[in-house]
Every structure is written in C-alpha cells, then in structure tokens.
Amino acid sequence: MTIHHILKDIFGFSQFRGQQEEVINSVIDGNDALVIMPTGGGKSLCYQIPALVNEGLTVVISPLIALMNDQVTAMKQLDVAAAAIHSNIDSGESSEIFAAIDRKELKLLYVSPEKLLSSGFLAYIKRQEISLFAIDEAHCVSVWGNDFRPEYVKLSILKDEFPGVPTIALTATADHATQTDIIKQLRLKNDKPYLSSFERPNISTEAKSGLKRAEQILHFLREHPDGAGIIYCLSRKSTERMADKLAANGYKARAYHAGLDAKTRQAVQSGFQNDTLQIVCATIAFGMGIDKPNI
C-alpha cells in the first residue's frame, strides 16, 4: 500500500500538505527528522503513515496522558492498531497491550519518556521489532524551551540502544536556538529541520487595558456565545476565581493548573476536547498539544 493510498483510504485526505510527503518518504527510508509545524498542521501524519508502511512497531513518546489518549482514540476510530501505556491504565489492560505487541498486532504504542526509559520496559522493547521512534512535543528536550523536561534529555540513549532505528522529533514550538538544541540533545543525524510556515491568518492579537478584566471578558463572551476558548491567568488562584465568575454567569467553565490532581486535570481536558466544557481558565500548564478546531 503506497503512502498516497494510506493517506486517502485510511486518513481521508486527497493530498499531502506542505512538506509532509517529503518528511514521510525520508523517514520511511530510515532517516532522522526534526519536524516543526503549527498545531493542526499535520505533524502526526509524518510518523503515523511510516508506522503503517514499515514492518514493526512505532513507539511514540508523549509528555501528557491526555495527548496519548486523544491520539489512540483517533487511531482506533480509523481502525489503526494503537495503544498507550501510562499510570491511568490497570494491570489487566496493560497485560493485553503487551500481549498484542508480542503477537505483532500493534502498529503504534504511546508512552511517556519516564515509562520508555524505565529499565524493565527498555529491555522489553529491545526484544521487539521497532521501526521508528517518534518524539512528540520535542521542544521539551531543550533548556531554551518553555516546557523543558529533564526526562526528555535522557532520550538520547535511544541512539545507543537502537542504533539502526530512525527518530522523528516533532513540535509546534521551536525558535532557532531550540531547534539546534533538539538536534544536539536527541543526536539526530539529519541537522536540517523541516520548517513549515507559522503564519495563521485566522488568528488575531489585540491588547487591552487590564482594568475591569472580568467585565471585559464577559462582554467578549456575550458577543461570541457559541465559541470555545482558553483564558490564561497569572496564578492558580486567579484561574479558580475567573472560572467561578464565569460559572456564576451561566458559562460552562472550569479551572486548570498544576495544583489539581491528575484525575481532575484529565476531566477538564477531556471535557474541553469533547465540547461539554466551553471555557478553561488556566495557567500555562494547559494547552500543549491541544488541537481543537472551534477555539
């Protein structure tokens, strides 16, 4: 099955966008790649299609459970064999996933960097036929990025443990210094990133006075009654105050910040993605990887 047949028959698209086809062919040929595309620009296809073309298992490293679950759900809806292993699944489900891997039925496996690098798991996947490592939100590897995570730096070990397996690193957030750092930290053999345009003509920016913020926000929402959105706040307390204010005015709004437990954060993100929640009042802990067309 060619990449064009997969694109049309499985994903429902008639043609590739931008540099997608060039990236996909390069990765299928066994090359590393750093892919920088805006959210919604089609980054995921750059590893999903190679996963379906090549024999073996593609391991996708993702920083957030919610992102893993969203991707797995989307893949299953397309009848693509995918699964995620993380702390929110029980031992029974985990055993089923490992059994599917052993039977070579799985094409995409989503894990966190912590899980991937654990000694038992790393030893396990070394016994499997791995076709590709895809590192999502790759800016987390760079000290120059806003979301630096030390665990991402340790992913350079993959080049020692799996010397013949290509790596594709993907992000929507990387300036030149961050791009250079990603290539260096992950030891990518291709030092030329695939960079798409970040021009978003559908997005506008406007600065207003900070006086009477809540009143200004409520006025904006009354003018846009059917939209969904994220209101970023400077502190955890202010996210909760703003969410309470909006809820009192009849809006489906909730707070999101790092001080909430994992179950609550998951519920908020799922509600927002599924349109049961209209507004999220958040710190910068929220938003990475969100691909929602009606914001």
Image (cartoon, helix red, strand yellow):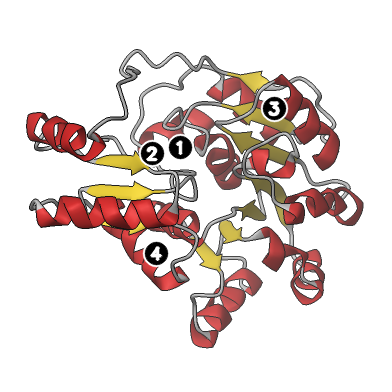
| Nearer to the camera, 36 or 109 | 36
Q: Is residue 130 left or right of residue 284?
A: right
- Number of the label disc, if any, that sits on residue 198: none
User: Where does label 2 land, which residue?
Assistant: 11
Q: Is residue 281 left or right of residue 88?
A: left
Of the two numbered discs 3 and 1 in the rendering, the one whose residue sits closer to the viewer: 3
Closer to the chain start, of discs 2 and 4, is 2
For badge 3, the amino acid type reads Ser
Residue at position x 32%, y 41% from top?
231
The local secondary structure at tag 4 comes to helix
Of the two numbered discs 2 and 4 in the rendering, the one whose residue sits closer to the viewer: 4
User: Where does label 3 land, which residue?
Assistant: 26
Quadrant of residue 116 in the image?
A: bottom right
Instruction: Tell me the crowding category of disc 3: few under 14, some 14 to 19, or many 20 or more residues within 10 angstroms, Cα based.
Output: some
User: Where does label 4 land, which residue?
Assistant: 266
How far apart are the alpha carbons under marks 3 and 2?
20 Å
Of the two numbered discs 4 and 1 in the rendering, the one whose residue sits closer to the viewer: 4
Q: Do the residues labelled 1 and 2 touch (CB within 8 Å)?
A: yes
The local secondary structure at tag 3 comes to helix
Closer to the chain start, of discs 4 and 3, is 3
How far apart are the alpha carbons under marks 3 and 1?
16 Å
Q: What is the x, y in percent for residue 241?
A: 28, 55
Closer to the chain start, of discs 1 and 2, is 1
Q: Work out which quarter of the rendered image holds the C terminus and state it.
A: top left
Quadrant of residue 110 in the image?
A: bottom right
How far apart are the alpha carbons under marks 4 and 1?
32 Å
How far apart are the alpha carbons under marks 4 and 3?
35 Å
